[in-house]
Image (cartoon, coloured by chain):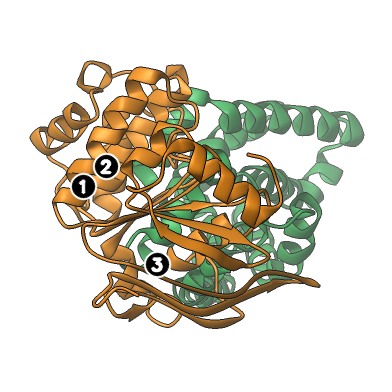
Chain colours: A green, B orange
Amino acid sequence: MAWKDLLVERRSKETLNALLFFSLALLFVFQFALGPDRERLAAVLPGLLWLGFILSGMLGLGRVFLVERENDCWEGLLLAPGDKSAIYLGKLGGSLALMFVMEAIVLLLFALFFNLDLAPVLPGLALVIGLGTLGFAAIGTLFAAMTAQARARELLFPVLLLPVLVPVLLGTVKATEALLLREPLADVAHWLKLLVAADVVYLVAGLLTFDFILEG
Amino acid sequence: MVADPLIRVRGLVRVFGATRVLDGVDLDVAAGEAVALLGPNGAGKTTLLKIVATLLRPTRGTATVAGHDCAREPEAVRPLIGVVAHGVQVYDDLTARENLRFWATLSGLPADRDTLTQALAEVDLERHAQTRVRTFSAGMKRRLALARVGLARPRVLLLDEPFAALDARARKWLEGRLETFKAGGGALMMATHSFGRELGAADRLAILAGGRIALDTPRAALAPDDVQRLYAAHTEEAP
């Protein structure tokens, strides 16, 4: 499933191109709004970084199941014998790969736009981004499946997803803030634990409920 | 009624809001037999197919495939059926071979090169194995869909307008494939609007009207004019 989604994306380039353009536009807006004031920038940078990830990620996740509407492939997935949680894991794998590529590019652009030296904090930051993205994608993929067949899916998807994402947002923004202030990783262990717990809960929820959601 | 049918439908009722689309449908299809469902738009042909295909739950009544209840045991029914509906369930941005590999892998079926090449050859698409489906005609997509369902060697085929978008050559080809499928002991249920050569594959005609089977009759004895006359008489609609 992940192989198929990535192959379709590689050929159509619909999602990645749109996400990159959107992220770039977002960075320009942030740059103009905040100006060169370093102090102001330092205070809001972690929130802005994750706002960029979440907004771009939501655009991408919202499209995860649209490809299945093409030629009624959704019905094909439903009729495929076997454990439907494999479909969920495949979709999640494809989404994660796409989001990591997008986040790496956004992070690079962030460093360039705001003149940041991220090299010393990169391992810690990668861990936080990895954990945050896993939780985000796990619950986002589930909600994308839930709203894929709904008429008002563009509206429903963010409305349902954002409240559930609060633990991930809280954990990632706080941990990123501490890392950018050059605090050691051990000082943000409680936020990392929150992220791990959220990841486990979202993943288990996805694996257990995806079958029912697919069946409608 | 057939003695030991592969598909058995009893007292099937399906209600959508205030509309009773199916209102007590009884129908059997035996192994090696094909039934063509005829009826005007909204008669419930697709609804009936979807219930047997486990894609829709009946409001009342039962549909079984090889003794398995379609609503209660969908996981037992799905490996036994092949469904080609209006949507052909293939991805436009994958090649024909990649599409087959994806669906075979997802269904836990062999997905080696030889198997896939053989499946494509059966639908006369082996020359287009590496071609993206986006460039296929509607008829080629439909043939690829048949190759997809054929991978699992289903015992039951459920086809919705199988001859739509096919040219004369492809129609003749499909007719032959359906005869081969029946000869292998498969049961076939197809919904159609047409009265042309596609009825040639059918052993029985079932006319749906008013949510019920208005007529269930062997086809062999009927001339094309007889079919049209019977259809008009039971549906109050000229074909």
State the CA–CA distance, disc 3 to disc 2: 34 Å
| Local SS, label 2 | helix
Structural crowding at the residue carrying mark 3, measured as other residues with C-alpha within 10 Å and reported as few (<14), some (14–19) or many (≥20)? some
Would you say the residues marked 1 and 3 are in contact, meaning their CB atoms lie under 8 Å apart? no
Q: Residues within 10 Å of mark 2 (few under 14, many from 20)?
A: many
Q: Are marks 3 and 2 on the same chain?
A: no
Q: Do the residues labelled 2 and 1 touch (CB within 8 Å)?
A: yes
Q: Distance between the residues labelled 2 and 1?
A: 5 Å
Q: Residue lying furthest left in this view?
A: B114
Dot 3: element: helix
Question: Is residue A99 visible from the viewing direction of this image?
Answer: no
User: The disc labelled 3 sits on which kind of residue?
Assistant: Ser
B197 shown above or below A66:
above
Determine which residue is flagged by label 3: A85
Q: Mark 2 lies on which chain?
A: B
User: Residue, x 88% and y 28% (percent of image)?
Assistant: A32
Q: Quadrant location of residue B121?
A: top left
Mark 1 = which residue?
A: B181
The residue where tag 2 is placed is B178
Give the amino acid at mark 1.
Phe
Spot occupied by residue B46 in the image (x, y as percentages of width and height): 55, 55
Q: Distance between the residues labelled 1 and 3?
A: 32 Å
Residue at figure coordinates x 83%, y 35% from the top left: A30
Where residue B124 sits: x, y (%)?
23, 23
